[in-house]
Image (tube, helix red, strand yellow):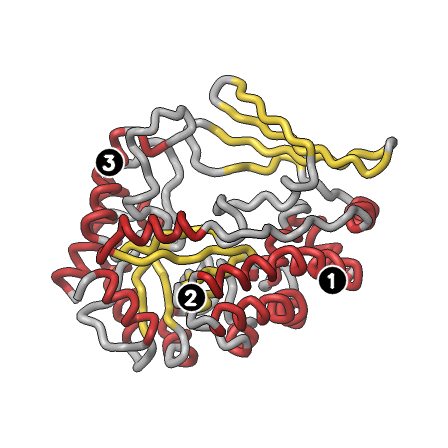
């Protein structure tokens, strides 16, 4: 089978020659070792072998945003006056939203040259009063177009080596990211009517563009991220139903209406919310982290939900970076065994995340190579 055929057959629940293996964000297409931007970690020579391995050997799943171009969406960019400055090895962005002549909400983020992530150093909403003020602002209009060309271009470049996965936050992701985690959990628990108003605001922003993307780009895999904000221990399962299922069900329905495949992304504990996820009639789940990062084993999810879902996981990125390769090989074999032990729709071997430091350590590269060796020769 070609790598594209293998992935599409897995999504459809059809037989495959072997389980696909994805490196998640590392796909060999989006990492540009020739881009000399000082904030591009992939121009360090240590990354080149892994980029080539992903390009030549992995079953490539390339993410493209449905609503936001970035994997880390900025929910206030259209409302704020923003300013970015570079100081040495760091880039700082500040957003300012003027509520009235006497009140300004501010949010600050930081990016470090040697770390491929964005840190929020000051969250926009700090109190209940900030939330109430934010809700009085005029709503942001939904985006009126879908960037089909970026999807079609990626698919053309991939050819038979993989597929494009549409990527979208859910309303909860956009809402929760406005607060620090402590403030979010307190307000989500104690001010539920107010929090629903915030979720409804983001739903009205997201839904039209997702519907348009699902219609104009049918039959693709989608990833919906954000549900983990309402998983235990942050919030109780009944609020997962209220804050995730209520607002994500329309997204799942839009995707499936046009022949797409809806995959829920939720780190951490799953045991108490698996039935709620199942009730949404989704097609897949990732990353299914094993204990102690999560609270359920992969074979349990395969046994109870695998007939309907494609399961993606369940290799910890910390294990890829830290375990001696013989020990990591045992983890890979265990994930493959558990992910295919019972009859089911399909399993994709995949890490829970990817390295984000400028220098890729030799041990990390060796463990990625071992993933490919096992899937090609040992399964």
Q: Is residue 208 above or below residue 105?
A: below
Give coordinates of residue 358: x percent, y percent.
36, 32
Q: Is residue 171 above or below residue 78?
A: below
Q: Nearer the viewer, mark 2 or mark 3?
A: 2
Q: Quadrant of residue 229?
A: bottom right
- Identify the mark nearer the N-term, 2 or 1: 1
Label 2, label 1: how many angstroms apart (C-alpha)?
30 Å
Give coordinates of residue 230: x percent, y percent.
61, 62
From the image, which quarter does the C terminus lie in? bottom left
Residue shown at 40%/74% (left/top)? 309
Residue shown at 45%/66% (left/top)? 263
Disc 3 residue crowd, few under 14, some 14–19, many 20+, Cα 10 Å: some
Find disc 2 in the rendering and name its residue.
218
Give coordinates of residue 39: x percent, y percent.
42, 28
Answer left or right for 330 relative to 196. left
Find disc 3 in the rendering and name its residue.
48
Q: Is residue 107 above or below residue 15?
A: above
Residue shown at 39%/31% (left/top)? 40
Question: 10 or 297: nearer the eye?
Answer: 10
Whether pointer 3 and pointer 1 mark residues with C-beta atoms closer than 8 Å, the reply is no
């Amino acid at each position: 089978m070609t790598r594209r055929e293998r992935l599409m057959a897995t999504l459809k629940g059809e037989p495959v020659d072997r389980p696909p293996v994805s490196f998640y964000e590392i796909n060999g297409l989006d990492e540009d070792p020739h881009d000399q931007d000082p904030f591009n970690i992939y121009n360090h020579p240590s990354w080149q072998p892994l980029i080539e391995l992903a390009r030549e050997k992995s079953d490539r799943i390339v993410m493209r945003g449905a609503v936001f171009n970035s994997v880390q969406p900025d929910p206030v960019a259209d409302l704020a006056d923003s300013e970015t400055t570079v100081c040495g090895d760091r880039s700082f962005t500040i957003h300012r939203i003027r509520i009235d002549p006497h009140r300004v909400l501010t949010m600050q983020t930081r990016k470090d040259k040697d770390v491929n992530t964005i840190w929020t150093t000051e969250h926009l909403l700090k109190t209940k009063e900030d939330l109430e003020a934010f809700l009085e602002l005029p709503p942001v209009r939904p985006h009126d177009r879908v960037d089909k060309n970026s999807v079609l271009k990626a698919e053309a470049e991939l050819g038979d080596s993989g597929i494009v996965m549409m990527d979208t936050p859910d309303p909860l992701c956009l809402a929760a990211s406005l607060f620090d985690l402590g403030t979010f959990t307190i307000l989500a628990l104690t001010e539920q009517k107010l929090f629903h108003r915030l979720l409804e605001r983001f739903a009205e922003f997201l839904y039209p563009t997702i519907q348009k993307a699902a219609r104009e780009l049918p039959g693709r895999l989608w990833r919906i991220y954000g549900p983990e904000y309402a998983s235990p221990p942050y919030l109780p399962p009944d609020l997962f139903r209220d804050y995730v299922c209520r607002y994500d069900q329309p997204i799942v329905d839009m995707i499936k209406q046009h022949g797409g495949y809806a995959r829920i992304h939720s780190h951490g504990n799953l045991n108490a919310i698996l039935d709620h996820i199942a009730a949404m009639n989704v097609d897949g789940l990732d990353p299914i982290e094993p204990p102690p990062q999560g609270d359920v084993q992969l074979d349990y999810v395969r046994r109870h939900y695998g007939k309907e879902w494609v399961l993606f996981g369940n290799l910890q990125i910390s294990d890829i970076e830290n375990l001696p390769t013989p020990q990591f090989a045992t983890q890979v074999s265990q994930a493959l065994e558990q992910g295919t032990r019972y009859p089911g729709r399909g399993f994709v071997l995949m890490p829970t995340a990817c390295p984000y430091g400028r220098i890729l350590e030799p041990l990390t590269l060796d463990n990625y190579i071992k993933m490919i060796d096992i899937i090609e020769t040992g399964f």
